[in-house]
Image (tube, rainbow, N blue to C red):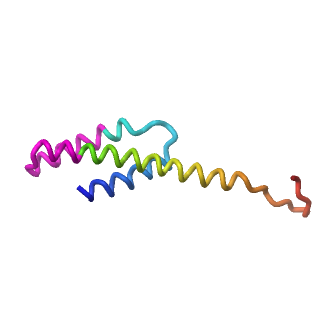
Amino acid sequence: MSTVAVFSLLIGSLLGGRFRIFILPPVIVVGAAILGAGLTWQGHDSAHTVVTILVFAAVLQLGYFCGAALVRARASAYRGKAAPSFDGRSFG
């Protein structure tokens, strides 16, 4: 279960940093289908499968939010700096 949480956090942060559109619903549906099929194939019961999918969805959303916030914070930090002038004058 912790492996699912770590990988969904990483995937969510990558998606949040890359996409501006709302990409989470299709990713959650595809990921839930893959997790459900894999856990059923391994013989886990339905309660374990549902909890794993819920953890996947929640941590994916947390990672998406953190990735998007990091990209926005980095962009605003670079946007605030004035570009250096070649002739030595600065324009306020």
The residue drawn where x is 26% and y is 58% is 2
Name which quarter of the figure residue 46 lies in.
top left
- Main SS type for the magenta part? helix
Residue, x 21% and y 45% (percent of image)? 51
- Out of 9 and 40, give the one closest to the viewer: 9
**Left or right position of 88 against 8:** right
Q: Is residue 75 magenta?
A: no
> Closer to the camera, 62 or 78?
62
The structure residue drawn at horizontal position 60% and vertical position 55%, both measured from the top left corner, is: 74
In x, y percent, where is residue 62?
Answer: 41, 48
> Does 27 sit above or below residue 3?
above
| Image x and y of residue 72, in percent | 58, 49
Magenta stretch encompasses residue 44: yes
Q: Is residue 13 left or right of residue 91?
A: left
Quadrant of residue 33 within the rendered picture:
top left
Compared with residue 32, is residue 1 higher up or lower down, i.e. above or below? below
The image shows residue 6, relative to residue 62, as above or below, that is below
Q: Which residue does the image show at 41% across and 50% down from the upper left?
A: 63
Magenta residues (range) = 29-52
Q: Quadrant of residue 77?
A: bottom right
